[in-house]
């Protein structure tokens, strides 16, 4: 008879299988690396893009090969409900962001907080219902909140908040680092869940 | 839907064996998965996984597709009937777990 802790293990198996693509965190980290290249391009250095695109494409191929060879392949379920939820969440996030912009403009409260709100919303949504498996996204959301709320301008010579510095784009750099770190943590979860099997083992 | 005891009596032995339940639970959450993924997620050795998959295939729960284009690959998916059986089995397990929780922590 399956006992509750077995069912918990089985639910973990189901969750990781259903969200296998989400846990392939090296892709998320790679996106973060691409954003870092964009930060440098932002400073007018086109070399960053010329160097960055081939590096990102090559790494993408290597990551794909790594996941297929080490963890195998899964074809995800194509359920209309899942697609509907994904589209709905995207519309909700964009709608929320636009609403925040409109409200900020109406009350003359423009500022970095809108980006902070968007970033936090995205991080919390990424953690989703199974936040216990991805607590790092909630930690990142909290870190983002602190970074946006704290008067960090007091620590800079210009007196402006570091996220207002656009050369280099500090805000984009912080977002990029968050992608890299969270991606690596997702990858760690996958590695811990899909452990290699010794061939001498029996069930 | 019956009482917990009726649910236990109706449990499908082919699916309920722990290793096979892990395999079918993974397959229930996707269209198909390859042999390597199933091996990693269940922790079974190649021989054991092959043996369980053969039993499930004979029982009409899974279908196994072997391709030899490039690198040989074995892809496993639930049959439509198998998907129904495993989904029903999961409903039964969930009901049993809820009933067990009621018994051990009444009123919570």
Image: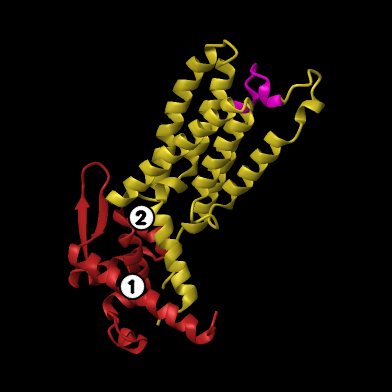
Chain colours: A yellow, B red
The x, y position of residue B77, in whole percent, is 25, 58
The residue carrying mark 1 is B91
Which subunit holds the residue at mark 1?
B
The residue carrying mark 2 is B36
* Placement of the C terminus of chain A among the 4 image quadrants: bottom left
Looking at the picture, does residue B13 appear above or below residue A194? below
Element under disc 2: helix
Looking at the picture, does residue A134 appear above or below residue A40? below
Q: Residue at x 46, y 73 (%)?
A: A6
Say whether residue A163 is magenta: yes
Q: Residues within 10 Å of mark 1 (few under 14, many from 20)?
A: some
* Placement of the N terminus of chain A among the 4 image quadrants: bottom left
Q: Which residues are magenta?
A: A162-172
Q: Residue at x 47, y 38 (%)?
A: A93
A203 vs A190, nearest the viewer: A190
Quarter where residue B89 is shown: bottom left
Which subunit holds the residue at mark 2?
B
């Amino acid at each position: 008879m399956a006992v509750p802790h077995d069912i918990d293990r089985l639910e973990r198996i189901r969750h990781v299988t259903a969200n296998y693509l989400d846990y392939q965190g090296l892709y998320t980290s790679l996106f973060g690396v691409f954003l870092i290249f964009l930060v440098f391009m932002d400073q007018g250095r086109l070399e960053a893009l010329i160097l960055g695109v081939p590096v990102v494409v090559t790494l993408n191929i290597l990551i794909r090969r790594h996941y297929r060879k080490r963890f195998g392949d899964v074809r995800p379920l194509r359920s209309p409900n899942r697609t509907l939820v994904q589209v709905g969440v995207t519309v909700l996030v964009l709608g929320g962001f636009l609403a925040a912009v409109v409200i900020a403009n109406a009350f003359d409260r423009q500022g970095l907080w809108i980006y902070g709100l968007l970033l936090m919303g995205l991080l919390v949504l990424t953690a989703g219902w199974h936040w216990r498996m991805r607590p790092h996204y909630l930690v990142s959301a909290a870190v983002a909140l602190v970074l946006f709320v704290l008067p960090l301008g007091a620590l800079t010579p210009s007196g402006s908040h570091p996220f207002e510095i656009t050369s280099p784009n500090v805000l984009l750099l912080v977002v990029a680092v968050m992608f890299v770190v969270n991606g690596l943590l997702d990858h760690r979860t996958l590695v811990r869940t899909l452990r290699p099997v010794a061939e001498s083992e029996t069930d | 839907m019956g009482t917990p005891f009726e649910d236990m009596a109706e449990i499908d032995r082919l699916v309920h064996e722990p290793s096979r339940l892990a395999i079918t639970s993974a397959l229930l959450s996707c269209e198909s998965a390859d042999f390597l993924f199933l091996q990693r997620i269940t922790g079974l050795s190649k021989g054991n996984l092959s043996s369980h998959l053969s039993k499930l295939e004979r029982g009409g729960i899974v279908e196994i597709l072997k391709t030899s284009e490039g690198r040989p690959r074995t892809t496993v998916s639930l049959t439509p009937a198998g998907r129904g059986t495993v989904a029903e089995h999961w409903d039964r397990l969930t009901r049993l777990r809820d009933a067990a929780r009621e018994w051990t922590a009444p009123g919570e």
